[in-house]
Image: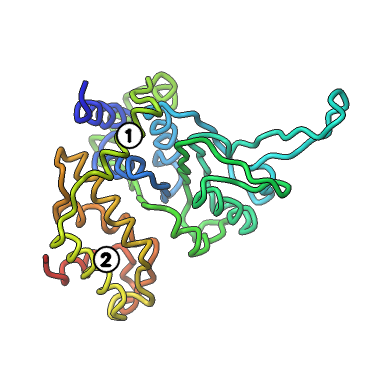
């Protein structure tokens, strides 16, 4: 089975669990192929946690889940050293962050102190516990879910942490046909437990190298830079995108191109991933009723192709 067949099998399997959301599924797979962390934001009950479980199982990666709550402490993530009488020494007991995929469920229900404990892990792929730096498994992904900020018991994620997520997606409510399939079918959580892993960690790393090898021509990079410059103009957003965000756009577009069976990035790839890749990094100006996603789409239409 070649790379394109494996990717098609991945998408097909995930679409059997989260029905009626093929675009969002492709965004998730593109995010992980690009080596980025994923934030899934939506109201409770639309399948955020189920999708995160399905992604981990389908990619064949070691998985752990943490339910974020207001009393969760940073040591609950990273682990602690406990004195063991038999060994007459302190022994480190690793926390759930030492997994290839960490599901941070309802991340914005934890305090800012605990949220910030993820920063080093997400950026550096390592944690510092009791003065000692410990490497995390490779690959390492954080898939976080969060509820809308206006719900009770939630804390807004700081900009520095939002910037660590390559993509933010929203599932939304299913259409009528998809909802009927959910009502008639088996429990999605039971289906997830039976999903086979379709990749190994080594195969995933090969696909990630394939993503990096996708060609981005100079005219395409000119277009990306024009989009970045538009965010900095003050017309659309209070602050523009950083160079790190520009790198994220290119990486995500390369992954999208690979999923579309091409060895080069097209403007369509950039446009397809742009709102999911940058909207969570921006604060819109102007029409108070228009959110960042809508502003990004309006800006994209206003910036001509290179």
Name the residue nearer the viewer: 78 or 45.
78
Relative placement, left or right, of 158 versus 5 is right
Q: Is residue 72 visible?
A: no
Give coordinates of residue 9: x percent, y percent.
Answer: 25, 26
N-term mark: 2 or 1: 1
Residue at 38%, 29% in the rendered image:
59
User: Which of the image's four quarters has the N terminus?
Assistant: top left
Where residue 292 appears, as percent x and y from the top left, is 33, 66
Q: From the viewer's perspective, is residue 234 above or below residue 19?
A: below
The relative height of residue 258 versus residue 85 in the rendered view (above or below) is: below
Which mark is on residue 88? none
Looking at the rendering, which quadrant does residue 99 occupy? top right
Note whether 128 is above or below 81 in the view shown: below
**Is the C terminus in the top left, top right, bottom left or bottom right quadrant?**
bottom left
Image location of residue 8, percent across then percent down: 22, 29
Q: Give the residue number, with chain letter if any, for mark 1.
A: 18
Q: Local crowd at mark 2 within 10 Å, few (<14), some, or many (≥20)?
A: many
Q: Which mark is residue 296?
A: 2
SS category of the residue bearing label 2: helix
């Amino acid at each position: 089975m070649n790379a394109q067949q494996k990717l098609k099998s991945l998408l097909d399997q995930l679409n059997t669990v989260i029905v009626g959301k093929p675009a969002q599924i492709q965004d998730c797979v593109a995010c992980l192929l690009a080596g980025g962390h994923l934030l899934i934001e939506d109201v409770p009950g639309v399948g955020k946690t189920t999708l995160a479980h399905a992604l981990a199982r389908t990619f064949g990666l070691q998985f752990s889940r943490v339910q974020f709550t207001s009393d969760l402490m940073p040591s609950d993530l990273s682990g602690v050293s406990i004195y063991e009488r038999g060994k007459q020494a302190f022994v480190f007991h690793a926390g759930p962050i030492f997994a290839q995929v960490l599901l941070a469920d309802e991340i914005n229900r934890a305090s800012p102190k605990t949220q910030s404990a993820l920063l080093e892990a997400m950026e550096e792929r390592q944690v510092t516990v009791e003065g000692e730096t410990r490497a995390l498994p490779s690959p390492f992904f954080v898939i976080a879910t969060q509820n809308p900020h206006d719900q009770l018991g939630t804390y807004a994620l700081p900009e520095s942490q939002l910037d660590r997520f390559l993509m933010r997606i929203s599932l939304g409510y299913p259409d009528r046909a998809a909802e009927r399939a959910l009502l008639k079918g088996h429990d999605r959580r039971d289906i997830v437990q039976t999903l086979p892993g379709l990749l190994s960690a080594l195969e995933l790393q090969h696909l990630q190298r394939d993503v990096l090898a996708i060609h981005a021509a100079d005219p395409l990079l000119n277009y990306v830079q024009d989009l970045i410059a538009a965010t900095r103009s003050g017309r659309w957003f209070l602050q523009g995108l950083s160079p790190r965000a520009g790198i994220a756009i290119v990486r995500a577009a390369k992954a999208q191109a690979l999923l579309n069976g091409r060895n080069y990035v097209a403007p369509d790839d950039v446009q397809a991933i742009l709102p999911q890749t940058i909207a969570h990094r921006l604060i819109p100006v102007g029409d108070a009723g228009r959110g960042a996603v809508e502003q990004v789409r309006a800006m994209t239409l206003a910036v001509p192709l290179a």
